[in-house]
Amino acid sequence: MNHLIESLRRIVGPANVLTEGDLSAWENDWRKRERGKSLAVIRPGATKEVADVVRACAAAGVSIVPQGGNTGLVAGSTPDASGTQVVLSLQRMNAVRAIDAANLTITVEAGCVLQTLQEAAERAGFLFPLSLAAEGSCTIGGNLGTNAGGTQVVRYGNTRELCLGLEVVTAQGEVWEGLSGLRKDNTGYDLRDLFIGSEGTLGVITAATMKLYPLPSARLTAWAAVPSLDAAVTLLGLAHRHLGAGLTGFEVMGQFALSLVACHFPQQRVPLFQDVPYCVLLENSDHESQAHARAQFERLLETALESGCVSDAVVAENLTQAHQLWHIRESIPLAQAEEGLNIKHDISIPVSRIPEFVRVTDALLAREIAGVRLVNFGHLGDGNLHYNVQAPEGGDASVFLREQEARINTLVFDSVQAFGGSISAEHGVGSLKVDKLEHHKSPVALAMMRAVKRALDPQNLMNPGRVLRM
C-alpha cells in the first residue's frame, strides 16, 4: 500500500493525502453512530486529479468512499473499520464554474456547499430552491448522490428534478462530460439519472449543471394548528387549490416534537402547539406582489377556519418572523438529539394514506413497546415523514437502542410497506438500511440494480456495501 500512497501524493500533492492525525471529520458519520478507519483521506482539487486517483486505486484493488460534506444520516459516506478504504473528499472542488442567465442554469463543482450555491444564484438575481437543515455544510455532490429532498420539494421536486447535467468520473477513471444544460435530449438512456441517488456506488460526481428560477416577488409563511392529520391533509388540498404553484412548503409537526423544541430551546417561542396534536407550517411564494400573496393566504386560512380543518393560525408579519417559524421546524432534530439517542425513520407514504398509517403504527408501537415516545414531523406536502422513535422517559437511551432498534425498524418498515410506501424518502440507503432494502424492494428491481452495478463497477470498488449487497 505504500506504493499506492506515494502515487496518490504525486497526483494531488502530499498535503492532500492525509494518513495521520485526527481524521474523525472524514472517518466518523455525522450521527456518530459509525466510526471508520481509512487507509488515507484524499483531497483532489480538479476532475483530472479525481480520475487519476480512481485509476490508481482501481489498479491497486483499493475501494473508494466518495464524500462531500459528510452530513448524511445513513452512514453512506464514511469508511468501514478495516483501514483499507480510501476516502475521496470533494470539498476542495467547490467552484461555481458558470451561470447562464438566459438558460436559467448554474454549473458548480461537487464540493460546492449548498448555501454557497444558493447565495451565488441570489446574487445573480435567481433562486436555487433546494433547502435543508444542513445547507451550511452539505455539498451539491452529496445532495445529488442521495437525491436530497428538503422543504420545497412540493413545488420544485427533489435534487434529481433540479439537475440538467453531470460530470462524472467512472469506476475505471474515465471522465463522462455530461454537463449540458439541455432540458430536452432524447438520445438514449438517461445516464444522469443513474448516478443521481446512487450514493457514490457507480462513480464520482465531480460537477453538475442545475436549474435556476426567478426570485419570487414575495414569500409569506403561516403557522396553523390542526386537530388531526386528516385535517392537515384537507388543509394541503385547500392550499393546492388556493395557492397553486405558489405553495412551496408544507410541513407537519407533532405536538411531542414541538414540545422537545420548547423544552430544550426555551428561547424559541413555539406558537399554538400546547392544545393541538399537530401544527402545520406553510409557505407561499408569489411572483406578483406581497399584497397579492397575503390576500391569497388570508382567503386560504379563512376557508380552512370555516371548514374546521384549522383551529387557529398566524401569518408571519415580516421576514424575521418567518425565519423564526422555520427555525422552530429545523430545530426538531437538534431537540431530539438533546433529549437523547433515537431511532430515525425517513419514510414516504401516499399523502392520502398518511393519517391511517400513523394511527395504525402509533398504536402498534405503543402496544409492543411500553412508554415509547414518537417524534413525528416532516414534509407532508410530498408525503415524506420523519417518523422517529424516542426511548421511554427516564430510560437509558443507549440500552433502548441496543435492545429495541432492530425490532422497531421491522415494525415500522413492515407497516410502511403495507401502506404502499418507501423505507427511504430522502436520506438514502447507505449502510444502515442496506440489509432492510433486501426485504422491501422487489427481487426484479434488486436484480436490475445489481446488473447496473456490475456493468459500471465490475470490481465493486465504488463505495462497496452501500445501497446494495453484491
Image (cartoon, helix red, strand yellow):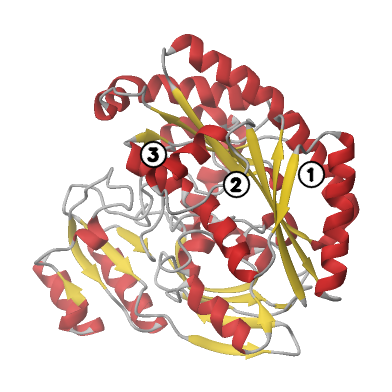
Viewer-proximal residue, 210 or 219? 219
Q: Quadrant of residue 319?
A: bottom right
Residue placed at 60% from the left, 46% from the top? Answer: 271
Residue type beneath disc 3: Leu
| Residue 74 appearing in the image | no
The earlier-in-sequence mark between 1 and 2 is 1
Q: Label 1 to label 2, Cα distance in Å?
A: 20 Å
In this view, the mark in front (1 or 3)? 1
Dot label at residue 432: 3
* Residue 333 picture location, percent across and down: 44, 46
| Residue 385 appearing in the image | yes
Say left or right for 202 vs 350: left
* Residue 22 picture location, percent across and down: 13, 63
Residue type beneath disc 1: Leu
State whether residue 219 is above or below residue 232.
below
Say left or right for 74 vs 357: left
Residues at badges 2 and 3 in contact (C-beta under 8 Å)?
no
Viewer-proximal residue, 359 or 292? 292
List the residue tagged with mark 2.
Answer: 271
Q: Quadrant of residue 376?
A: top right
Say left or right for 466 vs 379: left
Residue placed at 52% from the left, 51% from the top? Answer: 269
State whether residue 398 is above or below residue 346.
above
* Residue 425 picture location, percent across and down: 58, 44
List the residue tagged with mark 1.
Answer: 236
* Residue 362 picture location, percent across and down: 56, 20
Q: Residue furthest top?
A: 367
In this view, the mark in front (1 or 2)? 2
Residue type beneath disc 2: Pro
